[in-house]
């Protein structure tokens, strides 16, 4: 790739990428450990976090379990946008859907979680995740590729799927067999390196 | 801004122009002006389309100055949609130009006895009113093209489309933007129908030769504007999220929270949300040579809007904002941005409120008039409104009437005004505001202003559920005050987090007018506006029973959280107890 394929990354990351995590670890531990996100970025930039659809106020007590869906966002507009912020002044507005840690989770082994990236967080963290490689649902990847325009295909030379370099022309012509559940997708851009902040 | 222009459209011998000094209305701007005039001069029991109703158009206190974000316009009247008092707010160029022409308000009174339609020209030489029946039933875009050919492109134009002429409950008043397109609307509550009842098709404003309004203390004013602007630009919401993605950045957030009303409020999550998100929209706009960052008027530094081009790179509409993308998108099960942009264009062209129109179509879909997700059918239904067919007249009367005509049980309205894009079961606090707002269901009525900085009603423990009542009250007070300044409500995010930005706003007002306003004065202003509006509504026949959500929000849980609204009636009745 000569240029980061923002449209592809954006579609996939909004739907969610799949990552391995330690069972029973806290949301903060997951973000700083598995996702390698700096503490400053977690505290200052990721102001809104959802765990299984619920806005989270305390990322130290919220625990990850197998199949958890985590969504990360920067500060959002509107009363409701502000209400979704972690520990914000308007948390009462959404108190009935706020995340409350009730269960004890298994703390052994690894689990698979789905991570969604939105808005500024998507723009800033997305490329770094894809450079390191992320698991994606094969049908999501196939669908996203099918929706790409000429603009994408003109710039796309190859994608790395399950460690194998696949020519984009092959993907465009539908000559790649997506008959799989999940695939490891890696996107590298020549001369560019995105580190997760 | 030291005079009021009154035009009696029903005067014998044709419209009569009077210019008066401000008198008792001195010191009022925006919503404070429209609310005070309507409350004092309009009989609350009058028919909204009768000669007794008045249409009040007021720029904000700082409109027409160099202050950033100061170009919002308030339009007030008795609402044909709700039957209560209405302040409908619009961006575009009109507020700035009107203020520079020296008017703190235009008040349209009376009603002509004939079917002729009028255009009004206001420039530095005065006011001219002429009959122009060649404008009859022109949609807004065609109308503005015609007006432009006559008056050039240095003007601002306020107009109504066919919906306003047909006096539909959902008719808006269009205000032209910086490109002289009729894309900004005082949308809510049917203000366009009231303009239509006065038979005024267009108000052309030309401020050529008029200077910028000058502050009492220019040095302090300039300094305050600098701090204010810097505060907006450095804040992550006003300096980054809104310019990059517009308000539609909220689609993913509300959807993730399970508070995104889908298929006429049946579910809290829409499978096609990522396809119509702000992220997807911004990317598409840039790819097609449009703009993802654009202001609706000169002096806006946040620039939450954009230009949406079609597949061939031609202008289709302005960037549809979150509420529009939702009302025509998830609410109707539609996940195609091009169709949503087309619906936005049609709404602007016919001159209807995008929220009310979209919600009405969702209700019509529930009635079986079209299938959820059928974008073509939705477009055809809006075209019926533009044509004024019997079906179009029903739809143009809003979600409440459409629901009644077609026997739909679940109609998401309060005071007959359609709910915006947040399910009040998942986000109960906003439900409190929907229920109790003087305006009907309105997401901007209680906005995100720095209640704790203002110390409105004392500090609130945000973690206590009962805090929702206090929060809604405080937010409604603060919003009413900001609406009176003419500032775009989106400044609220920077004010929330940055006390120095809030102080800069006070400094702007103080240095301009030679005042010494404090946070307390702002609170008092907000309370006064709300009390005046409540009083009007009470005199118009509103009771506590009107401050309720439709019952199904309390009895039918919404997925994925399976929650109901559940705020007690007696608590709702406490919102205005101060
Ligand atoms: S922030 Fe948006 S709505 Fe507010 S003035 Fe600017 S463009 Fe208009």
Image (cartoon, rainbow, N blue to C red):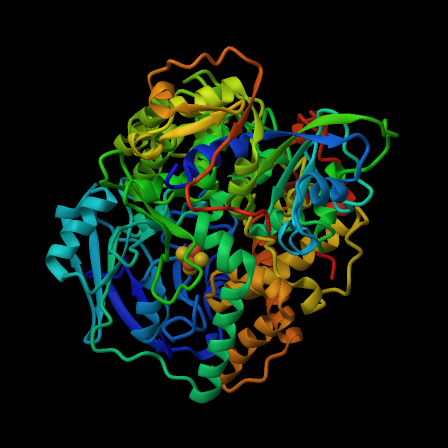
Q: Is residue B341 visible?
A: yes
Q: Is residue B49 above or below residue B403?
A: below
Q: Is residue A182 above or below residue A14?
A: above
Q: Residue at x 63, y 63 (%)?
A: B497
Q: Is residue B199 above or below residue B256?
A: below
Q: Viewer-proximal residue, B345 or B229? A: B229
Q: Is B113 on the left or on the right of B190, as rendered? A: left
- Residue B285 rendering spot, x and y as whole percentages: 34, 42
- Residue A77 rendering spot, x and y as whole percentages: 55, 51
Q: Viewer-proximal residue, A113 or A36? A: A36
Q: Is B183 on the left or on the right of B489, as rendered? A: left
- Count of numbered labels shown in the rendering: 0
Location of the N terminus of chain B (image quadrant): bottom left
Q: Residue at x 38, y 75 (%)?
A: B66
Location of the C terminus of chain B (image quadrant): bottom right
Ligand 1, seen in the image, is in the quarter at bottom left
- Residue A128 rendering spot, x and y as whole percentages: 55, 42
Q: Viewer-proximal residue, B369 or B502? A: B502
- Residue B176 rendering spot, x and y as whole percentages: 29, 55
Q: Is residue B285 above or below residue B510?
A: above
Q: Residue at x 46, y 63 (%)?
A: B34
Where on the picture, by quarter, is residue B525? Answer: bottom right
Q: Is residue B75 visible?
A: no
């Amino acid at each position: 790739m000569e240029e980061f394929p923002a449209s592809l990354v954006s579609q996939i990351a909004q739907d969610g990428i799949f990552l391995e995590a330690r069972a029973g670890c806290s949301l903060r531990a997951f973000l700083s450990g598995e996702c390698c996100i700096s503490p400053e970025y977690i505290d200052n930039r990721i102001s809104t976090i959802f765990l299984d659809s619920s806005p989270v106020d305390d990322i130290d007590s919220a625990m990850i379990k197998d199949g958890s869906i985590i969504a990360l966002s920067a500060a959002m507009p509107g009363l409701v946008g502000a209400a979704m912020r972690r520990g914000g002044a308007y948390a009462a507005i959404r108190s009935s859907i706020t995340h409350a840690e009730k269960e004890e989770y298994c703390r052994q082994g690894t689990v698979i979680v789905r991570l969604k990236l939105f808005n500024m967080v998507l723009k800033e963290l997305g490329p770094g995740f894809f450079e390191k490689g992320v698991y994606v649902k094969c049908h999501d990847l196939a669908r996203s590729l099918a929706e790409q325009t000429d603009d994408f295909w003109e710039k796309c030379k190859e994608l790395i799927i399950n460690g194998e370099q696949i020519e984009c022309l092959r993907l465009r012509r539908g000559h790649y067999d997506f008959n799989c559940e999940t695939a490891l997708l890696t996107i590298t851009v020549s001369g560019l390196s995105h580190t997760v902040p | 801004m030291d005079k009021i222009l009154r035009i009696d459209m029903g005067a014998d011998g044709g419209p009569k122009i009077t210019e008066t000094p401000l008198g008792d209305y001195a010191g009022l701007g925006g919503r404070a002006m429209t609310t005070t005039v309507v409350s004092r001069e309009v009989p609350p029991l009058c028919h909204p389309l009768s000669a007794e109703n008045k249409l009040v158009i007021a720029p904000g206190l700082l409109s027409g100055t160099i202050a950033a974000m100061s170009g919002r316009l308030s339009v007030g009247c008795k609402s044909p949609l709700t039957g209560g008092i209405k302040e409908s707010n619009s961006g575009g160029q009109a507020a700035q130009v009107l203020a520079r022409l020296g008017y703190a308000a235009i008040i349209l009174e009376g009603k002509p006895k004939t079917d002729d339609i009028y255009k009004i020209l206001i420039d530095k030489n005065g006011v001219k009113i002429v009959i122009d029946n060649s404008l009859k039933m022109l949609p807004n875009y065609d109308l503005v093209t015609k007006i432009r050919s006559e008056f050039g492109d240095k003007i601002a134009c306020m107009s109504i489309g066919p919906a306003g002429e047909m006096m539909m409950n959902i008719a808006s008043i269009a205000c032209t933007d910086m490109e002289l397109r009729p894309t900004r609307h005082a949308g809510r509550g049917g203000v366009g129908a009231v303009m239509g009842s006065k038979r005024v098709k267009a108000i052309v404003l030309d401020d050529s030769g008029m200077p910028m309004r000058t502050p009492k203390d220019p040095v302090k004013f300039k300094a305050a504007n600098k701090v204010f602007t810097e505060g907006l630009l450095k804040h992550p919401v006003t300096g980054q999220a809104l310019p990059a993605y517009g308000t539609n950045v909220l689609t993913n957030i509300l959807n993730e929270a399970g508070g995104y009303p889908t298929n006429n409020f049946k579910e809290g999550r829409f499978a096609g949300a990522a396809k119509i998100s702000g992220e997807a929209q911004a990317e598409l706009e840039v790819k097609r040579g449009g703009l993802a960052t654009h202001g609706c008027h000169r002096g806006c530094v946040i620039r939450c809007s954009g230009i949406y081009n079609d597949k061939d790179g031609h202008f289709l509409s302005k960037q549809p904002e979150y509420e529009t993308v939702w009302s025509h998108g998830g609410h109707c099960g539609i996940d195609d941005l091009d169709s949503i942009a087309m619906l936005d264009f049609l709404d602007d062209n016919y001159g209807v409120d995008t929220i009310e129109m979209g919600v009405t179509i969702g209700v019509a879909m529930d009635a079986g008039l079209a299938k959820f997700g059928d974008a073509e059918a939705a477009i055809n239904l809006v075209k019926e409104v533009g044509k004024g067919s019997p079906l179009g007249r029903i739809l143009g009367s809003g979600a409440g009437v459409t629901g009644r005509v077609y026997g739909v049980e679940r109609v998401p309205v309060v005071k007959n005004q359609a709910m915006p894009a947040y399910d009040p079961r998942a986000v109960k606090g906003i439900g409190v505001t929907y229920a109790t707002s003087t305006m009907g269901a309105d997401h901007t009525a209680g906005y995100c202003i720095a209640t704790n900085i203002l110390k409105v009603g004392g500090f609130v423990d945000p973690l206590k559920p009962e805090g929702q009542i206090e929060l809604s009250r405080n937010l409604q007070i603060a919003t009413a005050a900001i609406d009176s300044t003419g500032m775009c409500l989106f400044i609220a995010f920077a004010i929330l987090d940055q006390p120095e930005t809030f102080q800069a706003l006070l400094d702007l007002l103080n240095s301009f007018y030679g005042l010494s306003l404090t946070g307390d004065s702002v609170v008092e202003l907000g309370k006064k506006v709300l009390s005046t509006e409540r009083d009007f509504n009470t005199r118009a026949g509103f009771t506590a029973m009107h401050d309720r959500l439709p019952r199904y929000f309390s009895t039918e849980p919404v997925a994925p959280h399976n929650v109901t609204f559940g705020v007690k009636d007696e608590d709702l009745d406490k919102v205005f107890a101060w």
